[in-house]
Amino acid sequence: MSGLIGRKVGMTSLFDENGKNIPCTVIEAGPCVVTQVRTEEVDGYSALQLGFDDKKAKSSNKALDGHFKKAGTVAKKKVVEFQGFEGEYKMGDSITVEHFAEGEFVDVSGTSKGKGFQGVVKRHGFAGVGQATHGQHNRLRAPGSIGAASYPARVFKGMRMAGRMGGEKVKVQNLRVLKVVADKNLLVIKGAIPGHKNSYVIIEK
């Protein structure tokens, strides 16, 4: 799937022709530079390696500088490979937000916000043990029973329990592109996408 690397700017809302308020996410998508071209003959598959967001010179090293110098650009912070690009691209070409069109559907993936160590009510949607009466004490958000007694004498793998929540790669599919603002490299996409503000996201079509 072809696509672009972007940065989540934040959320806003638009009104449609019926006056309905639509929540949407603004993404700064590209311009992305083609930093390497993978071919069947050399690599065994076809793909384009795209780079996004310039890296400071002091944060780079000679190996990275040499790699990006072949494409005639500076070192990039985020590098991702995409397959399925139509047309001929060579190293150094720039792919902009105009790769997308208004009305089409895209998949957006990113790293979700980290929530730290959370209990079962927040992490899995448990209701808690229930009432505070009949001898219950501090059990409103407890997980309850996690298994039987002498048999099987263990807790089954995959049991939903408290633990670290968030900070995982999440993909949201079939989001509609509402607007393409080419002069500012912005995509306005219906709905929410994973990640905090200024986090990197990958948009695929």
Image (cartoon, helix red, strand yellow):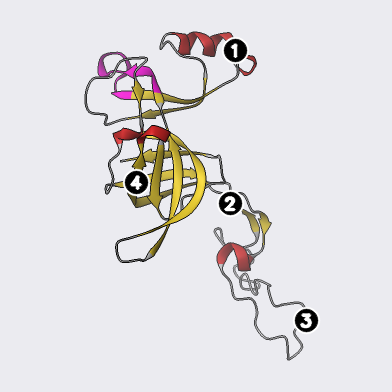
Q: If the image is split into quadrants, where does the C terminus sit? A: top left
**How many angstroms separate mark 4 from mark 3 (CA)?**
53 Å
Query: Which residue corresponds to the image point at 57% horizontal and 8% vertical from the top-left?
Result: 62
Quarter residue 140 falls in: bottom right
Residue sitting nearer the eye, 82 or 139: 82
- Is residue 141 positioned above or below 70 on the image? below
Q: Which residue is mark 1?
A: 61
Q: Is residue 192 visible?
A: yes
Task: Determine the secondary structure under disc 2.
Answer: loop
Q: Which residue is mark 3?
A: 137
Q: Position of residue 88 (x, y in %)?
A: 23, 20
User: Which callout, 2 or 3, points at the residue further toward the start of the chain?
Assistant: 3
Residue sitting nearer the eye, 173 or 184: 184
Residue sitting nearer the eye, 185 or 64: 185
Residue kind at label 3, given as amino acid type: His
Residue sitting nearer the eye, 26 or 82: 26
User: Which callout, 2 or 1, points at the residue further toward the start of the chain?
Assistant: 1
Residue kind at label 2, given as amino acid type: Gly
Are circles 3 and 1 on residues that touch, CB within 8 Å? no
